[in-house]
Image (cartoon, rainbow, N blue to C red):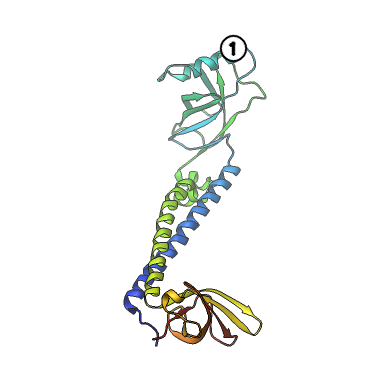
Amino acid sequence: MTHAIPRNRAERRKGIADLCQKLTLVMCSLVLLGALDGMQAGFRTDKTMFCVVRGEETLVSGDLYIPPGEQGVRVHAEAENSAPGTNLDGYIRYSTTAPGLSMHFIEIKGRLWRGLLRVSDSAALGDARLDVFLRGCPPEELAPYHTVRIVPDRAALAASQLSLFRRIFGVEPWWVMLGAMPLAALCGLAVFREKGREMNRLLANGVAPIYKLARRGDHWEVVFGLGTNHGVREGDTLAILDRNLAPVGSLTAHTVQNEISHANVDMRTKIAPSFFVALRN
């Protein structure tokens, strides 16, 4: 007869551990999906394309083209070294092919500029060209430019997103990843602690997991977590329990150490790596 374990409490704790384990898998999957979605969208996104809803405004950024020559270098230095709160529209200019489109520049760091792109209710739908340049340095023919895609509503804006999370849920994939990571860690820690407590409860009742199950010719070699410290002696017969702790067979310990023991069992014996070994009263 094997040592008894309170079934209701054990099953309840096992249910909680299983739930946490499933939540961990879900959160880890979200972390992976968020990272993959963010990377594929980043690789495929055209950095020179701005998509905005007609009648709304959005923050945009881009690389400033600084033409060779004294004028461009001087104006760029003035803009970058201007006092906080300075109206940068006096240093950075723009031109566009779309009536109803306007820009207000709010920051410049090195070659990177940031600004507020506004589209009026009367602007025509479709693509328009946007050139950004320094004062006194009109855009050159080969200078890079931006394309502004004006869409009718937010549904069209969502449909244009390359990120699945942005397109379907309206959420940045990086926020999904960052939000899921701590939850995955917490659930994983809960599973680890519960598994540890469960193992301690099992050992206290004379039940231990199988550490190793290897085929050796005509028998299984079994290494399990009960030894002399738990009262096992060479030649002792112990019970084999399935993963639900139900008896399914027996084995005899032939080599016993402090914390582990070895046994050989017939190949026809019902046994698996997820099974347990228990002391007999």
Residue 141 visible within the image: yes
Against 28, is 222 above or below?
Answer: below
| Residue 242 position within the rendered picture, expressed as x and y whole percent measured from the top left | 47, 81
| Residue 177 position within the rendered picture, expressed as x and y whole percent measured from the top left | 47, 50
Q: Quarter-wise, where is residue 73 in the image?
A: top right
Quick one: label 1, few (<14), some, or many (20+) residues within 10 Å?
Answer: some
* Residue ID at (45%, 76%): 228
* Residue ID at (60%, 23%): 65
Q: Nearer the viewer, residue 196 or 185?
A: 196
Q: Say left or right for 84 vs 271.
A: left
Against 253, is 30 above or below?
Answer: above
Q: The residue under label 1 is which amino acid type?
A: Gln
* Residue ID at (52%, 51%): 164
- Describe the element under mark 1 as helix, strand or loop: helix
Q: Quarter-wise, where is residue 13 in the image?
A: bottom left
| Residue 40 position within the rendered picture, expressed as x and y whole percent measured from the top left | 58, 47
| Residue 104 position within the rendered picture, expressed as x and y whole percent measured from the top left | 46, 25
Q: Quadrant of the N terminus?
A: bottom left
Residue 100 visible within the image: no
Q: Say left or right for 118 vs 8.
A: right
Q: Which residue is mark 1?
A: 71
